[in-house]
Image: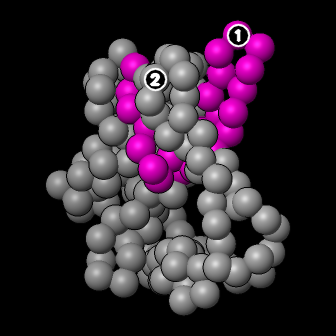
Amino acid sequence: MKYSEAREGRTFIIRLEDGEIVHEKLEQFAREHAVERATVIAVGGADKGSILVVGPEEGHVKPVSIMTHELYEAHEITGSGTIFPDEEGNPVLHMHMACGREENTVTGCIRKGVKVWLVMEVIMTELLGNGARRKTEPETGFKLLEP
């Protein structure tokens, strides 16, 4: 385990609009408001055609071959994640969502593009006094958190 400590800064209440791509809009918001590190929670709807990363095809095999799932219709969602800068200082959102419709639920990472259906409510809480960042791990190509 690796860890560091941070304190809470500003809290933003954000409404994403129909058709917006979640990670693109939240990373843009972070850049425009000088949010380098944050926690993020969301509730709302994800539209048909949204794509989730739902796991590696095989456990600990490298290179990692990811599996994706495309939503077949609008789904209710709840999600949580973090924003930390990459090696170039760009804010990178890592967020997982549980997306449900009727009795079916799928959970995964939103990095491939989740599109808002109607509205998504987001609370972004800034983290201050911390130097954590995402560094590219050569074996997987993933930008992993270095606290």
Amino acid type of the residue tagged 2 in the rendering:
Lys
Q: Coloured how?
A: one colour
Report helix, strand or loop for mark 2.
loop
The N terminus sits in image quarter: bottom right
x then y, percent, for residue 88:
29, 82
Q: Main secondary structure of the magenta part?
A: strand
x then y, percent, for residue 15:
33, 27
What residue span does the magenta drawing correspond to?
95-117
- Which one is in front, 70 or 143? 70
Which residue is labeled 2 in the image? 48
* Image disc number at residue 102: 1
Task: Please determine whether, in this image, residue 56 is positioned above or below residue 46.
Answer: below
- Which one is in front, 36 or 101? 101
The C terminus sits in image quarter: bottom right
- Which one is in front, 23 or 56? 56
Farthest right residue? 59
Q: Residues within 10 Å of mark 1 (few under 14, many from 20)?
A: few
Which residue: 71% across, 61% down? 56
Residue 67 is covered by the magenta coloring? no
* Image disc number at residue 120: none
Q: Residues within 10 Å of mark 2 (few under 14, many from 20)?
A: some
Mark toward the viewer: 1 or 2: 2
Report helix, strand or loop for mark 1.
loop
Amino acid type of the residue tagged 1 in the rendering:
Glu
x then y, percent, for residue 102:
70, 10
Specify whether 88 is left or right of 22.
Answer: left
Farthest top residue? 102
> CA–CA distance between discs 1 and 2?
15 Å
Specify whether 40 is left or right of 18.
Answer: right
The earlier-in-sequence mark between 1 and 2 is: 2
Instruction: Confirm whether residue 122 shows in the render.
Output: no
Give the tally of numbered discs: 2
